Every structure is written in C-alpha cells, then in structure tokens.
Amino acid sequence: MGIKILKPGLFTTVQDKGRFGYQHLGFSGSGAMDQFSYNLGRKLIGNSGPSLEFTIIGPTLTFTQANTFVITGGQFNAKLNNINISNNNVLLANKGDVLEFGPAIKGARGYIFFGHPLDIEMVAGSYSTHTRSKIGGFDGRALKKDDHIKVVQNSNFKVNLGKSSDYDAIEQDNIIHIIEGPQVNAFSREKRKTLVESEYKISDQSDRMGYRLIGDNIPPDNGADIISEPVGLGSIQVPNDGNPIILLNDKQTVGGYTKIATVSQLDLKKLAQFKPGDVIQFKWISVDEANAMLKNFNQQFEEKLESVTKAPIFNMHSMRATSKKLAKLIEEEK
C-alpha cells in the first residue's frame, strides 16, 4: 500500500538532502535541487522520509491507502480530486484519491512529502536517485507510469495535518551571485567582465547534472584543458567553445575544464527554480559577502520554520461533493 503513478510527469525522482562523503569513491552528491523547499517540506510533514522531486511538468498519482502529504517548491496548479490545492499546506488524502499537477506556472521544480513516508532503501547513506549511475531512489531511475511505491506505516502520519507556511520558493530577480573559481586567472580581465555584463540563457541541453548557458563566449586564454580535479557544486566550467556550464547536483565528481567561478551557495536554490529558456545574469561577490548573505537568509528561513502554523483543516471530500452539486445546478440553469 502506498502510491501508484498514473502519469510520471517530465522527470520525477526520489530525492532527499543528498549523498555526502562518497565523492572520492565516484558517487555524485545528488539530492534535492532546491534544498530550502526540501527542508520546509520535511518540517511541515514531520518526518525524515524522502520526497518526490518533479521538474517542469508534475506527475499524477493515486493514493492506495490514506495518507497525509504536502507540496513545496514551484507552482504547478496542483489538484486533489480535481480541486485546486496550494503549496505548503499539509493535507489528507483518502484511499483512491488522485493528486495531479500541470505544467510549471512559477518555478521549475516541486516536491511532495508524505506522512506515511515512501519506503525506499538507502544507498550510501541516502535515498536520492542518481539516474546516470542507476543508484538510489526507485530502482535508480525516474518514475514511470504504473510504478507502485510502498510506504512505511506510521501511526503518527496525521500529526502535522493542517500545518502550513507562507514561504515562497520563487524569487523575483534573475541575479546569480558568484565568487572567483579556482582557475579564474585563466581568463582575461575583459572576459571576467563580460561574464557579469552579459545575460545568459539556460539552454535546452540542461538537466540535474548541469545548466549549459547560451550567451557571450568567454573561452579561457590558453585552452580549457587542465589536469582533472574534484569539482564543487555550483562550479562554472568553461570548455574551449567558451559557453559556461554550471555544475549541479548530479554533476560528475571530477572535471578537466577551467572553472571561472562558483555560484554562491544561497543562489543554488534560485537556480533550481529556473528552466530552459530562462535568462540569468551573474554578479561577482567576495567569499565573505557570500557567507554573510547565506547567514542572513538562513536566519530568516529558520524563523519561517519556527513559525509554521496549524491552519484550519478543510474536508477536501466535502468540497468535492459541493463542487459537483454546484456544477449540476449551473448546468440545469442553462
């Protein structure tokens, strides 16, 4: 008993905070692209189980037993039994209920958490899926139609029913703050200036491994090839064609291209909610500035987590019956 996937969406995988301490063995970190939306979901649902992360087009699933759930991240016109529901509210679904999402309205990635957590086996200390190496999550792959995922039976699955938050995962600007990368000196002052004075479009060849950018080329002065070395989350590689690539959660563990910059840790969540076709602009900051910005936001976010409130519990099934009656009356009046 658990959930059954009716439509998988564009790319839906099991994710948690990520797989840490194994990069030296070749394991990518993986994990939720928007860590703040992930942390909010865990706080709201009240357990440490994994989430479903979906991208650009969300899934449709049915509950094969009663469960609570909460949605965080981007806006996807979510509906339970064809009734609109909002993010950041812990709701109850009965056996047979259908949860569906449309295309992204705001943002690019959403998350679903369950009161009866998904019953997923850990690999190297994490539930997260890394599809390229086919490890973690549900059979190491994105979800497909008719997948049935069992859940862990949790007698307290309703404990956080009705809890909510007003946190908004979508930011209004497109500025991505960056600090100097390990090979910044491989680029002339003019090219470093071009990086922040130009706008870059996220290409269609972008995924959880990295965002390829389209814009002004900034090839390194003496070639892009270096001796392979470990690469960090948010590193901006520039190969010989001069088109920057931002390395993200499913990145390789080592790379042999020059890295001009690294995205500030805080702005990784902003990047997670951009999709192909969106335009971003970089801004240089210092390490101290990046740390101060992260510290300030973390304090605000912790206040959001502490202010999670218990909202009135709406009976979705009564609402469904009422909506059907209204629709019938309207039809009779025509």
Image: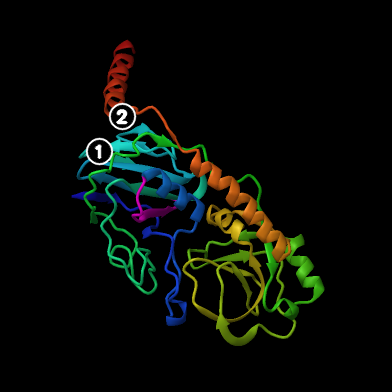
- Residue position for label 1: 97
> Does residue 266 sit above or below 170 in this rendering?
below
Q: Secondary structure at mark 1?
A: loop
Q: Quadrant of residue 224?
A: bottom right
- Along the viewing direction, whichever of 226 and 327 lies nearer the viewer: 226
Left or right: 204 with respect to 28?
A: right
Q: Residue furthest bottom?
A: 227
Q: Is 70 placed above or below 201 here?
A: above
Identity, as a three-letter code, of the amino acid under mark 1: Asp
Residue drawn at (64%, 51%) of the image: 296
> What residue span does the magenta drawing correspond to?
46-58
Label 2 packing within 10 angstroms: few (<14), some (14-19), many (20+):
some
- Give the residue at x 48% y 50%: 37
Relative image position of residue 302 (x, y in whole percent)? 54, 47
- Left or right of 80? Residue 206 is right
Residue 161 visible in the picture: yes
Residue 93's spot in the image, x, y percent? Answer: 27, 38
Amino acid beneath label 2: Met
In magenta stretch: residue 294: no
Label 2 belongs to which residue? 316
Q: Is residue 55 magenta?
A: yes
Question: As drawn, which residue projects farthest toward the right?
Answer: 190
Instruction: Name the chief secondary structure element in magenta.
Output: loop
State yes or no: discs 1 and 2 in contact (Cβ < 8 Å): yes
Q: Position of residue 230 (x, y in %)?
A: 55, 80
Q: Quadrant of the C terminus?
A: top left
Q: CA distance from mark 1 to mark 2?
A: 10 Å
Which color scheme does this rendered protein use?
Answer: rainbow
Q: Residues within 10 Å of mark 1 (few under 14, many from 20)?
A: many
Q: Nearer the viewer, residue 331 or 46?
A: 46
